């Protein structure tokens, strides 16, 4: 991955200046401005470009404001006019394939937010552009970089559990964070691929990386059983407002009143008139086509089986993973938020990492190793710093300053991005067809061997 290790003072552009872009813009114009220069921003919503310009001014680091582009067709023009070397893609998932392929063909390397894309066609188009251009693409799996996930990888790689035979992995999203996927573009499957692609691609990447194996075959089952108009009506919840930005919304913790959250108001509510993007749709409204309860069985090339479950309306948030091996078992338990506060809990970013502790469930993390015939022992997890379980800070350092020699192999290549979405794409095919799906049958394209990724 030469482009990553020889970055120099790269010329960057960010496409899609919504919520996620803020972390990249802060990193590029703040901590990493000595090695990176943000030369352009592109978003189809001019109001969100204004928001990011203000963010940059507010950093007070003296960097020049980037050039701004507002037409989705401006990808090539922007790259040429501003001599952009690396494009960061933080647009909605269904737009990734087109933007990535165009940016590569226009001569830039690309850093894309997960998921790589939402379907088999998008994957093929990206692979074709990569083969044609030989350029570099990085999928930013920040979860790999959080110390607890790195610690589990290290433990498995050390051979402590022996050869991995199976993995059991449950992820629960709470009624604050989980509910938020049912309020905006993610709620419509063609936009996000559903939670199996949008959210679980993080989780499948973690498993692929933890056990260093390749997913082969997927059986999925699941449905929308909590959110959505039909489920709400069955529970007697009727006459709901179409959106959360209404008076007295604070009586209902599922309604998100954008006026109560300064950043969300400025980013979305104030800019609705440009494009009609509504950020606060009722989670019990019509038009939701994604699932909120999902279960998968995934067979791996090397033999192990993954049992995976995702729930998006849990009262607490976190995950439990158990890795069984020929020598014993490792268990990682993470409680990211022990409980969601009742009134007006909806999406207050300041609440993301804590919730009320009650002595029964506390926020925290625990990694345990138990080898056969031995008592269990706790494995220390290093302190985390910053967003996403400490993943973002380390990820940005690796992205913008060049990856150091990393025995944990945390920098994710194209192949990792493809393998992560391949499980969700196969899962969606399985949900549609009611039977197990071989990933090889999806025809996701073949990366040219000359790229050195071995696909
Ligand atoms: N790794 C993580 O932890 C993490 C967290 C949040 C989001 N994400 C990912 O980041 C991406 C963006 O998510 P978000 O929550 O910021 O979404 P968002 O809706 O807040 O922002 C998306 C932005 O893209 C713009 N846009 C839409 N189509 C465009 C186009 N064709 N060209 C240019 N701009 C366009 C929109 O106007 C909007 O400003 C998604 O792929 C999501 O999966 C990753």
Image: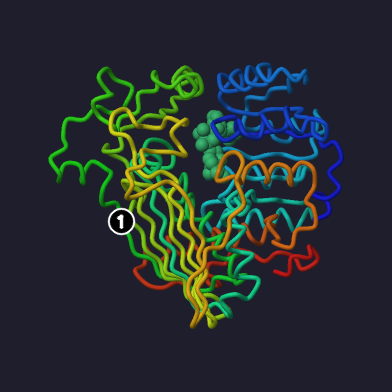
- Image coordinates of residue 52 in percent, x first then y, are 62, 23
- The image shows residue 250 at horizontal and vertical percentages of 28, 24
Query: Which quadrant of the figure has residue 205?
Result: bottom right
Asked if residue 154 is positioned above or below residue 23 in the image, the reply reads below
The residue located at (68%, 57%) in the rendering is 410
Q: Is residue 92 visible?
A: no
Q: Nearer the viewer, residue 422 or 252?
A: 252
Look at the picture and state if 251 lies above or below 124.
Answer: above
The residue at 26%/38% (across/down) is 284
Residue 172, x across and y down, in percent: 38, 52
Quadrant where the C terminus is found in the figure: bottom right
Horizontal arrangement in the rendering, residue 262 relative to residue 158 (left or right): left
- In terms of depth relative to the viewer, which is nearer, 377 or 451? 377
Quadrant for ligand 1? top right
Q: Which quarter of the rendered picture does the N terminus lie within?
A: bottom right
Determine whether 389 is above or below 415 in the image.
above
Label 1: which secondary element? strand
Using residue 94 as the reference point, say whether residue 229 is left or right of it. Answer: left
Q: Is residue 138 left or right of residue 252?
A: right
Disc 1 marks which residue?
223
Residue 100 point in image, percent of width and height: 66, 45
């Amino acid at each position: 991955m030469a482009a990553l290790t020889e970055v120099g003072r790269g010329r960057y552009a960010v496409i899609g200046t919504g919520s996620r872009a803020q972390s990249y813009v802060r990193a590029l114009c703040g901590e990493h401005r000595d090695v990176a220069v943000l030369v352009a921003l592109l978003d189809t919503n001019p109001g969100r470009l204004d928001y990011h310009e203000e963010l940059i001014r507010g950093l007070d680091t003296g960097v020049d404001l980037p050039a701004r582009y507002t037409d989705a067709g401006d990808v090539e023009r922007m790259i040429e006019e501003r001599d952009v070397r690396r494009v960061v893609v933080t647009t909605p998932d269904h737009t990734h394939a087109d933007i990535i392929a165009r940016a590569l063909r226009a001569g830039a390397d690309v850093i894309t937010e997960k998921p790589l894309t939402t379907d088999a066609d998008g994957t093929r188009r990206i692979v074709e552009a990569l083969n044609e251009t030989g350029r570099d693409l990085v999928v930013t799996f920040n979860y790999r970089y959080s110390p607890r996930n790195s610690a589990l990888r290290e433990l498995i790689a050390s051979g402590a559990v022996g050869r991995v035979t199976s993995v059991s992995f449950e992820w629960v999203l709470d009624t604050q964070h989980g509910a938020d996927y049912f309020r905006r573009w993610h709620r419509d499957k063609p936009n996000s691929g559903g939670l199996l692609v949008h959210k679980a691609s993080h989780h499948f990447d973690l498993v692929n990386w933890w056990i260093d194996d390749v997913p082969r075959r997927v059986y999925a089952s699941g449905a929308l059983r909590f959110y959505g108009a039909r489920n709400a009506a069955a529970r007697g919840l009727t006459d709901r407002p179409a959106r959360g930005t209404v008076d007295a919304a604070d009586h209902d913790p599922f309604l998100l009143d954008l006026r109560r959250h300064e950043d969300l108001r400025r980013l979305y509510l104030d800019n609705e008139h440009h494009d009609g993007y509504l950020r606060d749709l009722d989670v019990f409204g019509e038009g939701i086509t994604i699932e909120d309860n999902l279960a998968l069985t995934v067979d791996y090339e090397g033999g192990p089986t993954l049992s995976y479950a995702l729930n998006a309306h849990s009262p607490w948030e976190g995950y439990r993973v158990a890795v069984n091996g020929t020598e014993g078992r490792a268990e990682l338990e993470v409680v990211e938020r022990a409980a969601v506060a009742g009134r007006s809990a909806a999406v207050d970013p300041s609440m993301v990492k804590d919730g009320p502790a009650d002595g029964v469930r506390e926020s925290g993390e625990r990694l345990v190793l138990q080898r056969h015939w031995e008592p269990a022992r706790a494995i220390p997890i290093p302190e985390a710093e910053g967003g996403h379980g400490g993943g973002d800070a380390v990820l940005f350092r690796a992205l913008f300053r060049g990856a150091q020699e990393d025995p944990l192999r945390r920098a994710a290549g194209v192949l990792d991005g493809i393998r992560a979405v391949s499980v969700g794409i196969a899962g969606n095919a399985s949900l549609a067809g009611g039977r197990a799906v071989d990933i090889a049958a999806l025809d996701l394209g073949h990366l040219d061997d000359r790229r050195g990724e071995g696909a």
